[in-house]
Image: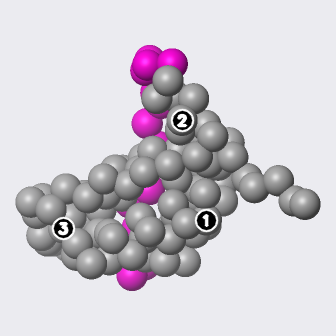
Amino acid sequence: MLVTCRSAKEAERIARGLVAARLAACGNILRNPVRSIYRWKEKIESAREVLLVIKTSRRRFPELQAAIKRLHSYEVPEIIALPIAAGSRSYLSWLAKSVAPRKKR
């Protein structure tokens, strides 16, 4: 998933929250700011943002999306899911285990 954030601090807070909740296996924070140019409320805007790349599974998307909306400062945060076309078996296994809900005892 791709999520742009207002700052590295916000991206880290979101990533930590998602990993702690087992909604994401990993969050990569690209600290070099990206320059975003976009239309917002009928005006062309521009902002420096930080890109957060989140690794998760398709089935965790609804919960992950809700958590991002709750944790994010933007009124309409970018939440874009990209499919995994292929990956190493060991990495994909780790990812699946990392986002599997904890079994209740």
Query: Separation of disc 2 and disc 3 at Cα?
Result: 29 Å
On screen, residue 15 versus residue 98, left or right, reads left
On screen, residue 5 versus residue 103, left or right, reads left
Q: Secondary structure at mark 2?
A: helix
Q: Residue at x 38, y 55 (%)?
A: 27
Q: Residue at x 32, y 77 (%)?
A: 10
Is residue 37 something one can see in this rendering? no
Q: Closer to the observer: label 1 or label 3?
A: 1
Is residue 48 something one can see in this rendering? yes
> What amino acid does circle 2 point to?
Trp
- For label 1, the crowd category at 10 Å Cα-Cα, with few meaning under 14, some 14 to 19 and many 20 or more, is some
Q: Secondary structure at mark 3?
A: strand
Q: Residue at x 9, y 60 (%)?
A: 32
Query: Residue 49, which numbered label?
Result: 3
> What amino acid does circle 1 point to?
Ala
Front in this rendered view, residue 46 or 72: 72
Q: Is residue 9 magenta?
A: no
Q: Residue at x 39, y 81 (%)?
A: 73
Q: Position of residue 65 (x, y in %)?
A: 56, 60
| The magenta segment | 73-89
Q: Quadrant of residue 96?
A: top right
Circle 1 sits on which residue? Answer: 21
> What amino acid does circle 3 point to?
Glu
> Which circle's residue, 1 or 3, is located before the other in the chain?
1
Q: Main secondary structure of the magenta part?
A: loop
Front in this rendered view, residue 83 or 22: 22
> Which circle's residue, 2 or 3, is located before the other in the chain?
3
- For label 2, the crowd category at 10 Å Cα-Cα, with few meaning under 14, some 14 to 19 and many 20 or more, is few
Q: Is residue 52 above or below residue 96?
A: below
Query: Residue 94, which numbered label?
Result: 2
